[in-house]
Each structure stands twice: as C-alpha cells, then as structure tokens.
Amino acid sequence: MLVSGKRRLLTALLQAQKWPFQPSRDMRLVQFRAPHLVGPHLGLETGNGGGVINLNAFDPTLPKTMTQFLDGQHHPEAAALVPLHPPRSGKQHQQVMLYISHCIPEFDHLIMGPEATAAHYSSPTLQEVDWEVELAVVMGKKGKHIKATDAMAHVAGFTVAHDVSARDWLTRRNGKQWLLGKTFDTFCPLGPALVTKDSVADPHNLKICCRVNGEVVQSSNTNQMVFKTEDLIAWVSQFVTFYPGDVILTGTPPGVGVFRKPPVFLKKGDEVQCEIEELGVIINKVV
C-alpha cells in the first residue's frame, strides 16, 4: 500500500518537467496553504525544512486534504500525508507509551500546525502550562484487535508533537479529572512533516529534545520508551478502532517544567522548539 502510493507520487513528479531534484527514500509529506492557492493542498517537502512541491499541481486528481488522502479516497493505493492540520476529529486515543524516567499516562487531544502560536498562558484559566516533546505515530490503515506483529502495517509514518500540558488542570482542578489539562485550544502542535515509516531507520532509536528560549530542557532517545509502537497499537486497538489519520502520542522524556525545583512554566514571549532526529523540528511561540 505505502510503497505503491510512493511510486505513484514519484511517477507523477518525474513526468513533470519542473521536477527540481532527484527522488529519494526520504518522503516528507505535508498539507499546506499559500496566499495564491485556494484551500489546503498536498505537498512534498524537498528536505528537512526545505521547500514544498505542490503535488496537486502535478496531479489535479489527487485529494487536497489529509483525511481524504489517508482514507484513500479516489486513490485507494495512495500513501498517507502529514497531519499539519487536524487529521481527524471526534475520537481521542489513550496514550500508554511511556519513558523509563517519566511514567505519566497521557491522552491525544487538540491539534495545531508546526508553527502555530500557542495559547495565552498567563490568563486566569491557565496558570501552569508546561512543555512536552513527543514522538507522534500517524495511522494509515483502519484496524481493531491488531496483533503486535501486524501493527506496523497500519502505520503511515511519524512526526514531532509538542504535548502542551496545563499542570494545574492536570493535578488540582476539575476534581482531578485531568483530561482537560491536555485539551485546550492550540495545545498539540504537530509537524513539520509526516516522514513515512520506511524513511525512518528505527523509530525506537531517535534522539529527542526540547528547547525553551534556546536552552535544552529535555534530551533523550526514543530507545528509552517502555512500550514500543507495536505494543501500543496492539493494546489500544483492543478498545477502539483505528482509522487513517488517527494520531498516537508516545509519552515524553524527563525534563518537564513541573518537576524542576522550583517548578518552571511557560510564559508570554517564550519560544519552544521540539526536535526529533530524522523527523525535524517544530517551533511554537507563547502569546
């Protein structure tokens, strides 16, 4: 499925005379907007942080949204694209993949783009907003009761997530029903692209870090995750059905603000950079 989709996209691009570079295995797929275009378009990023090729310009029959392409509408053999905008609304998946030194269960939640401006964290509603860099898994195939040995066949690729967290709502407010602490508007930037799974040498051996105003606050490796992608998918799929475009966050390494002494929280003017090796970096400013 994924290989044939990539082959189809590369064939379409190679047939176009405007192809600006040689194709490679590193497929970085995006949904983007531009002032001269109407609505979202599908694109191919030319490299980590590079320019974007408009795939719809080469093949107008391709869908123009992530969800349509992930669902295989019009082109059932197509590969999945990055959820730079909400890939699918309505369903939230429990997160159970944790790091050895930071074992806190987490949930999926609202989604924003890789350079989206974060919420106003100094408001009366939000007092203790924290950072969390996480590996995000994007599903590319529907399934339930998925075996661990079959799990990767349901994965489209990986991207970077900033799992912004309101610690006061997680630990003290709303009767300590802490889901709300993960679900405020703008709280889950994703990006910068969906790197297809065959372009990542080993998703469980990637350097992962977070910087606040240029200072490294989290630095680890995904090989420290207690549960791997396959185990997570097998576990969660016992309870819910996965659909193309569903996103699973995989937990965060140590170094978050709430556990510092004294605790440190984000404030207006801060800039947060979340980076994962091979996947790229997302930058979000607090306003």
Image (tube, rainbow, N blue to C red):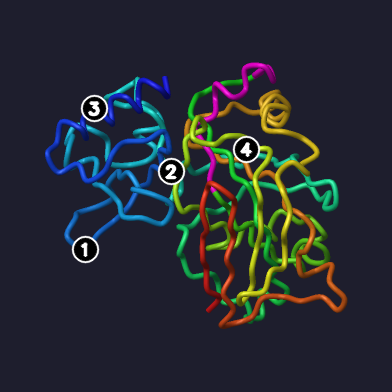
The answer for how far apart the CA atoms under marks 1 and 3 are is 28 Å
Q: Which of marks 3 and 4 is nearer the N terminus?
A: 3
The answer for how far apart the CA atoms under marks 4 and 2 are is 16 Å
In depth, the one of 37 and 186 nearer the eye is 37
Q: What element carries label 3?
A: helix
Q: Which of marks 2 and 1 is nearer the N terminus?
A: 1
CA neighbours of label 1 inside 10 A, class few (<14), some (14 to 19), many (20+): few
Q: What is the x, y in percent for residue 41?
A: 27, 47
Q: What is the x, y in percent for residue 157?
A: 51, 36
Q: What is the x, y in percent for residue 236?
A: 69, 30
Task: Using residue 258 as the reference point, say whether residue 110 is left or right of it.
Answer: left
Which residue in the protein does label 4 denote?
Answer: 203
For badge 4, the amino acid type reads Pro
Q: Earlier in the sequence, mark 3 or mark 2?
A: 3
Q: Do the residues labelled 1 and 4 touch (CB within 8 Å)?
A: no
Q: Earlier in the sequence, mark 1 or mark 3?
A: 3
- Up-down: is 50 above or below 231? below
Q: Which of marks 3 and 2 is in front?
A: 3
Q: Is mark 2 on a helix, strand or loop?
A: loop
Q: Which of marks 1 and 4 is nearer the N terminus?
A: 1
Which residue in the protein does label 1 denote?
Answer: 35
Q: What stretch is highlighted in magenta?
A: 145-159
The answer for how far apart the CA atoms under marks 2 and 1 are is 20 Å
